[in-house]
Each structure stands twice: as structure tokens, then as C-alpha cells.
Image (tube, rainbow, N blue to C red):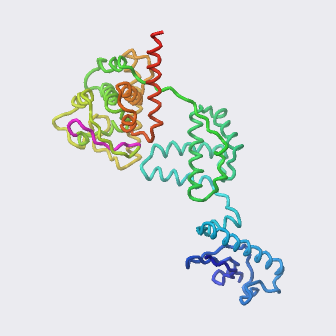
């Protein structure tokens, strides 16, 4: 049971000789204090009767306020301990005085810092730009969670669309991160769930089509004549490799080393999900890999000679910058390759991921296995490819009409 009494803090006397009046709570032999907001000269406190002496100005009114507050506090303690026996001092303070406004940016910066400290530099930078947009909209002034209402979000969404010209899915990404900050504050018990406007405000998302290559289109790219030893040929081979090797992301293909290859198996840590993947390479992927193998290839050398051997991968920002620069050039060359191969689609490295997934499902690979190889967080992400394949089957059957 929690005991609650009024105390005058002789240990907290200020330079004026005034002491704060607190409510002292003792629970499980642990002492905590709640401020009453009242300061009085130490000599004006009656320690025997635990109240302000009558000589103090407005003593009657102040004693009444203190008495009313402690009665309310004792009532909250009895009520909640009877029900749950788990009320904390912070929760009691919130019930009596309400929660103080919490600065949105403080929590946002802590979340951003956690991304960077965990090596998720790309995520950090993308989310940092989202917060910078919000700061610009607020003229670099502080904003509290309580200020971000449904009406505020409605106006901010209009600002993103009209003033900045952001597309629906860009707006969705920005608002989704703001919601992430709200959820973090709720999880830390810094704000109440009822404060979040996202229970009423719907974040709009526009469905996008997943571009992938047909078998014929992939063959055109695969068989395109490109001068041996050139960087553009290396980029083409990496893309085709990924189309056969489980749709590995460009960051994972770039960091593949000879030490990751055990005969016909790859054993790698997926950069985005931090999951370990043991992947058996099909013949087409192995054939590509062997064209890059040399007698002096060392376990720590990269399979595809794009990143510089010996690059410090522990320096998250340096490594992320190297991957970003390499990816930009790869995608530029893939557009040149697709034009030369007469493939009328906008090609980026990520298309290899879509190509492998749709091909795997067409070949009858169970969707759960496809999801695991793609390292998806949940099956819903993989279902998108299943819908694509089903749509293709429907069109095929329509031909009989």
C-alpha cells in the first residue's frame, strides 16, 4: 500500500530561505515526491501539525488547497491500487496535474539517432529530411505533440502536396514517420494514446505497379553483346545475377565477397533486415559468378569489382555513401542497356527483385518460401507478386474467349 503525506522539504531550501511543499509517496520502501507548486519560508511551516502557520499570508486558502489535493491523491492511490496495484508515481502525477506538453522534435531526434547508431544511415538520412520539412513548415519553432491535431495534419498534407508538389506516396512516407514518432512517445508513456490524431486521420496510399521482366526481355538483356572488362558489362552481369539469385538487393550484391560463397551456396547477412540468408545459387547465377573469379581472388575481395577492396564497412556512413554512388551509376547504365537491348521498360536494379519473385511464383515456388528468400517482414509484401502472377494467368485464360 502506498502512503501519502504532505511534507516541507527542509533539504530543498533556496537562497531566500523558502522551502517547497511536496507530497511524499512511499511504496515498497521506495520514496518519491510530487511537487505541490507551493514555496513558503521555512519558519512559516508547522512541522507538528504538518500545515502552514496562520501568520503566513493566505495560509487558510493555501492549507485548503494542499488538503484538497492530498485527499484527491489519496483517493487516486486507493482506487488504482485496488484495481491494478501497479500505479507509478509518474502516472499519479499525470492524473493530478495532467502531462506536460512534450516536444515532438526531442523524440524525433532520439529516433533518428537510434537509426544512425544502428548503422541504418540511409534510413536516418531519409527520415531526417522528413523532419527538416516539418521544421520548415513550422518556421523552425518548437512543436508539441498536443499541437499536431487532425486539423494540423490536414493543413500539413495540403502544404506537402500543393506547395512542395509531393506525390501521394511521398506524402504517405512523411506522415507515416510522424506517426512512428507518436507511437514511440506513447510506448514510452510520454503521451496518452488519445492525443494521437492518427486514430482519426487516414494516411492515403496510391497503389503502384511493380515492373518486372518477362523471360524474353531478360534473355535480350542477358545476351546483349557488351565489351568484356567494362564497368557497364559488370553492371549488366550483376543485374542478371540478381534476377536468378533470389532477387538480392543491390546493396547485398555489391557487398558479396568470395568468402560468402561456399561451392554453390551463398551465406550472407542481408543489409536491410540484418537477417542471415543461406541461398543455393542456380546454375545461371553460378556461371556469372565464375566469370569474375581469378586465381588471386581472396575471401575478403568483392565478387563484383565495383566497390574498392578493403573498404571500411564498419564506418556505416562511408559504406552507405559508397553503395549509394555505385547504385546511381548502375541504374544509369541499366537504362542504357535496356535501350540497346530494345526492352521498352524503365529499368533499375530493383526490377531484378520483382523479376525473380514473379518468375519463382510462376514456377510454383510456395509463396512462404518466396517471402523468406526475399527477406520480407511479412507475407503481405509478397502477396503483391502473387496478385501480379494471378493477373497474368487471368489474361492468359481470357485468350480462350
Q: Quadrant of the N terminus?
A: bottom right
- In depth, the one of 86 and 284 nearer the eye is 86
Does residue 60 sit above or below 286 in this rendering? below
Can you give x and y, in whole percent of width and height, for residue 393 in the image?
44, 19
Can you give x and y, in whole percent of width and height, for residue 200 in the image?
67, 43
- In depth, the one of 166 and 90 nearer the eye is 90
- In depth, the one of 325 and 358 nearer the eye is 358
Q: Which residues are magenta?
A: 262-272
Q: Is residue 269 left or right of residue 119?
A: left
Q: Is residue 393 left or right of residue 73?
A: left
Query: Magenta span has 391?
Result: no
The residue located at (47%, 22%) in the rendering is 391
Can you give x and y, in whole percent of width and height, for residue 376 in the image?
42, 39
The image quadrant that residue 72 belongs to is bottom right
The image quadrant that residue 252 belongs to is top left
- For this orientation, the residue located farthest to the left is 295
The image quadrant that residue 190 belongs to is bottom right
- For this orientation, the residue located farthest to the bottom is 48
The residue located at (67%, 69%) in the rendering is 79
Amino acid at each position: 500500500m502506498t502512503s501519502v503525506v504532505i511534507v516541507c522539504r527542509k533539504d530543498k531550501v533556496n537562497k531566500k530561505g523558502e522551502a517547497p511543499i511536496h507530497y511524499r509517496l512511499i511504496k515498497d520502501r521506495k520514496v518519491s515526491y510530487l511537487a505541490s507548486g507551493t514555496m513558503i519560508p521555512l519558519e512559516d511551516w508547522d512541522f507538528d501539525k504538518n500545515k502552514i502557520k496562520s501568520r503566513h499570508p493566505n495560509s487558510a486558502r493555501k492549507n485548503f488547497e494542499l488538503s484538497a489535493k492530498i485527499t484527491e491523491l489519496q483517493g487516486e492511490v486507493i482506487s488504482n491500487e485496488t484495481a491494478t496495484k501497479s500505479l507509478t508515481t509518474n502516472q499519479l502525477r499525470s492524473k493530478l496535474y495532467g502531462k506536460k506538453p512534450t516536444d515532438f522534435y526531442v523524440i524525433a531526434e532520439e529516433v533518428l539517432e537510434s537509426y544512425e547508431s544502428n548503422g541504418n544511415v540511409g534510413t536516418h538520412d531519409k527520415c531526417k529530411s522528413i523532419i527538416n520539412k516539418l521544421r520548415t513548415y513550422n518556421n523552425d519553432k518548437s512543436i508539441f505533440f498536443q499541437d499536431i491535431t487532425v486539423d494540423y495534419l490536414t493543413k500539413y498534407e495540403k502544404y506537402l502536396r500543393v506547395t512542395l508538389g509531393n506525390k501521394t506516396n511521398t506524402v504517405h512516407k512523411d506522415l507515416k514517420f510522424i506517426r512512428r514518432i507518436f507511437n514511440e512517445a506513447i510506448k514510452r508513456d510520454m503521451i496518452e494514446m488519445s492525443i494521437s490524431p492518427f486514430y482519426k486521420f487516414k494516411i492515403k496510399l496510391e497503389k503502384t505497379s511493380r515492373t518486372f521482366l518477362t523471360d524474353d526481355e531478360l534473355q535480350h538483356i542477358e545476351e546483349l553483346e557488351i565489351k568484356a572488362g567494362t564497368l557497364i558489362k559488370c553492371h549488366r552481369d550483376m543485374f542478371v545475377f540478381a534476377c536468378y539469385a533470389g532477387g538480392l538487393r543491390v546493396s547485398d550484391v555489391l557487398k558479396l565477397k568470395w568468402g560468402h560463397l561456399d561451392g554453390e551456396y551463398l551465406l550472407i547477412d542481408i543489409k536491410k533486415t540484418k537477417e542471415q540468408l543461406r541461398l543455393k545459387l542456380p546454375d545461371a547465377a553460378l556461371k556469372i559468378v565464375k566469370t569474375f573469379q581469378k586465381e588471386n581472388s581472396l575471401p575478403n575481395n568483392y565478387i563484383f569489382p565495383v566497390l574498392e577492396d578493403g573498404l571500411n564497412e564498419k564506418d556505416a556512413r562511408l559504406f552507405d555513401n559508397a553503395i549509394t554512388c555505385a547504385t546511381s551509376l548502375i541504374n544509369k547504365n541499366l537504362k542504357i542497356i535496356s535501350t540497346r537491348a530494345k526492352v521498352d521498360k524503365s529499368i533499375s536494379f530493383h526490377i531484378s527483385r520483382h523479376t525473380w519473385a514473379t518468375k519463382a511464383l510462376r514456377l510454383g515456388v510456395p509463396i512462404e518460401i518466396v517471402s523468406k528468400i526475399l527477406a520480407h517482414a511479412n507475407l503481405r509484401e509478397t502477396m503483391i507478386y502473387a496478385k501480379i502472377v494471378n493477373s497474368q494467368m487471368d489474361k492468359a485464360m481470357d485468350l480462350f474467349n
